[in-house]
Image: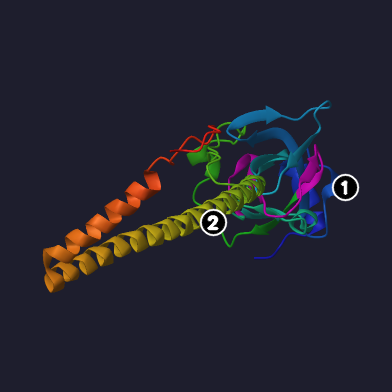
Amino acid sequence: MSVLSKDTIIDLCKNRDLIRNWDQSCVEGASYDMRLGADIYRNGQHSTLNSENASIKIEPGEFVTLSSLEHLKIPNDLVGHNGLSSTWTRRGVVSLFSPQIDPGFEGMLVVPVFNAGDSAVTIRLHEKIFTIEFTFTDKPAPYLWSERHGPQKNITSIPTPERIRPNFVDLHDIEKKQQDIQRSLDILNSRVDSLKASVDRLDGFNSGFASKLSFRNLSIALLSIILTLIIVLFGTDIYSKILRVVDENEDISTAPPKGNLYDETPAQ
């Protein structure tokens, strides 16, 4: 088994219809560079490239299914190995296609790709994107791939995964939302701190007020204790005398003045 060289590939294209829509300029020393076809599948929808819409832009983190312009017709004694051209892999595009193309495969190549880079990648219609090499088998395969699966004529028959994973663009949006949430939390924390300071001031006021109230209650209690001791030690007579002195002082302080302040005649 050996990899087919340029001349053998050209001979098979001419005489055994190995590659349809082939171009000799795409034949390399031991491989063929397949070009981007018109059929595209992205976000669960099929679309077609044309002269007015002649390119596809794959965003970072985006999954897209591409097709080849050329159609293969691999005989039962040949195996193909497919991969992305290094031009695209260096830009972060990753092929999710099985590298082997079985004997008897017929039709276009349908290759799912993923942009693992940090910038968008634009691929133009009929631009070289896939590289395929061919190898003879030690003996012909017992059956053809197309006998079991049929020719691969279009891309719409290929199931494409739904877009349920977050891509890098979505992650940027999530990061921005996280920053907005963090700013809101900072504002909320600031307001909470301000509210705590107000509560602390109120607690200080209440503590001062409670202290004054406690001092007044303590004074009244002490006065009551003193009066009780006086009664116990000196009896009710001294307590009555104290009350009379207090009453007399109140009478003196509240008694009206003798004579009329506005009368020129001295009081008799």
Q: Is residue 176 left or right of residue 161?
A: right
Residue 215 placed where, x, y %? 36, 63
Amino acid beneath label 2: Ala
Q: Is residue 99 left or right of residue 250?
A: right
Query: Mark 2 sits on what residue?
Result: 197
Does the magenta portion include 117? Answer: yes
Query: Mark 1 sits on what residue?
Result: 25
Q: Residues within 10 Å of mark 2 (few under 14, many from 20)?
A: few
Q: Nearer the viewer, residue 192 or 251?
A: 251
- Report whether residue 227 is seen: yes
Q: Residue furthest top?
A: 52
Precedes in sequence: disc 1 or disc 2 = 1
Magenta residues (range):
100-129
Quadrant of the frame with the C terminus:
top left
Residue positioned 56% across, 53% down in the render: 189
Q: Residues within 10 Å of mark 1 (few under 14, many from 20)?
A: few
Residue 27 placed where, x, y %? 82, 51
